[in-house]
Image: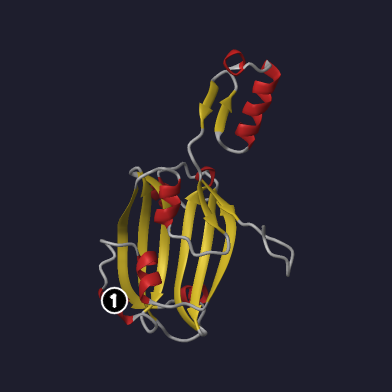
Amino acid sequence: MALHYRVSRMTVNKALGQLTRDGYLDRRRKGGTFVARPLGRSAVMEIAAVADEVQATGATYGFRLIARQVRPATKADRADIGTGGPLRLLALETLHLADATPFCHESRLISLAAVPTAETADFAQEPAGPWLLRQQPWSSAEHLIRAVTPTAALARSLGIPATTACLQIDRRTEFEGQPITFARLTYPGALHQLAARFSPAGEPQP
């Protein structure tokens, strides 16, 4: 590379080091330097579709509906979706894929009081997230982001060792104070990152 670009070996090494720190290269001791698998990226303050995250990496998106159940909300469900009263829910479990490889596991609760048409929607043909964005307006959203160790069942679903660190995003959306949906998205930590851009209050971003 130094000969090809007519630069010093030190310059090439610094460039490779920076590309590694930025996540574009994977340098392995005694193994060589490889192009890193692209990371999925989502915006912290936006409701991003997992399909868009997958396609941004250059992979082909797919998904599989694992479970679907209509049931009364449990105490844990009410805490997740943000209500103290009785509620009838649609509970969904979906596995999102990138080039047929597990990319993200989604557990979702949908309030059937807020979105009654969800009960008969075919979420085996379309994921619930994009469907909800088209069908139901929302006025506020709350994100909780944390690092977790997956349960054995979740690790099996994602095809990862149970000791793998994962990034988990809990997202609750409401419309004028009424809960709509709660989604828990779990990503293998090495395959996903969060990004946001900020500017000082009152100053426009360049």
**x then y, percent, for residue 83:** 50, 82
State the image quarter where residue 118 is shown. bottom left
Q: Is residue 109 above or below residue 160?
A: below
Displayed quadrant of residue 70? bottom left
Tell me which corner region of the image, top left, top right, bottom left or bottom right, holds residue 133: bottom left
Q: Relative to 9, does residue 119 appear above or below in the rendering?
A: below
Q: What quarter of the picture does the C terminus occupy?
A: bottom right
- Seen from the viewer's position, the closer of residues 9 and 97 is 9
Left/right of residue 28 with respect to residue 102 in the rendered view = right
Q: Quadrant of the N terminus?
A: top right
Residue located 40% across and 43% down the image? 159
At a point 32% along the width and 81% down the height, the residue shown is 116
**Amino acid beneath label 1:** Glu
Q: Nearer the viewer, residue 67 or 134?
A: 134
Residue 63, position as x, y percentages in the image: 33, 54
Task: Determine which residue is flagged by label 1.
Answer: 119
Q: Is residue 176 above or below residue 21?
A: below
Residue 105 locus on image (x, y percent): 42, 55
